[in-house]
Image (tube, rainbow, N blue to C red):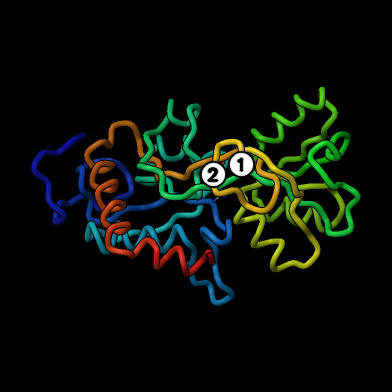
Amino acid sequence: GEMTGTTESGTETSGDGGSSMPNKVVIGSDIPYRPFEFETAAGELKGFDVEIARAVFDEELGITSEFKKTSFDTIIPSLKQGNFRVIMSAMTINEERAKEVDFSEPYFTAYQTVIVRTDSDIQSKDGLKGTTVGVQKGTTGLAAAEGLKEEFGGDLELKEYDQITGAFDALTNGQVDAVINDNTVNAEFVNNQDGARFLEGEGAAAEQGEDAPPYLTLTVENYGIAFRQDDDEFREQVNEALAAIRESGTYDDIYGNYFSG
Ligand code: ARG
């Protein structure tokens, strides 16, 4: 239950609800999702989300943050069951999810994009008709693929993977013809694997007057930190901390560590 007048020296230490301001916050996340959350060869947790979490929770709010690995497909029910206090997992804010959780202010803009093998015959969105597309379960990439399938009158096969790495492997192995996923995560794969490329073309970003990336964008999305719906006070504090790190330049420094230009 809600406690009044709690301070950061409150007794709540677990990831589940309790005091509005815990002294430790457990963060649910599906890892790996490079460059947002991933482990280095040495087993060190890194990524844009990880650094934003440290800046917001540890530095601004003075509470210890700890990531807990969890499957993306079940991450919202898991939050609601109290397995962690918040979700930070490159999670897109959308209406469907907002019925189940409350989101922080947006902290990152992303686009759904399509990658294919470098030597693929597929050159445009329409070229995907009749092909097989890999996506991660429970994601907005899946939702975008379902939208495309409808557009093609059903003529698109979808294969769902528990983690994005499964979809990437399937692309490399030829089990799928394309992967639909968040742009910067696809970019990481394209840049490091030398066997995949983005589908080109204009899209949602240009239509919405955004700074359009140089490849096809199926959607424009914003990431948010997700909270249980009874966690307003904590969510407000986190929103203030997010604003503070934007103000101080910390956000831009972290952004620069992962994204150039
Ligand atoms: N932004 C997409 C979504 O919200 C994909 C997020 C996947 N995140 C992850 N850590 N695996 O559905």
Residue indicated by mark 2? 210
Query: Callout 1, which amino acid?
Result: Ala
Mark 2 nearby-residue class (10 Å; few <14, some 14–19, many ≥20): few
Screen quadrant of the N terminus: top left
Residue indicated by mark 1? 206
Q: Residue 236 carries which label?
A: none
Q: As rendered, which of 215 and 170 lies closer to the eye? A: 215
Q: Is mark 2 on a helix, strand or loop?
A: loop
Q: Are marks 2 and 1 in contact (CB under 8 Å)?
A: yes
Residue 215 seen by the camera: yes
Q: As rendered, which of 177 and 13 lies closer to the eye? A: 177
The spot of residue 69 in percent (x, y) is 50, 54
The spot of residue 211 in percent (x, y) is 55, 49
Residue 83 seen by the camera: no
Mark 1 nearby-residue class (10 Å; few <14, some 14–19, many ≥20): some
> How far apart in space, not on screen, are marks 2 and 1 (Cα)?
6 Å
Residue at (47%, 61%) from the top-left corner? 48
Q: What element carries label 1?
A: helix
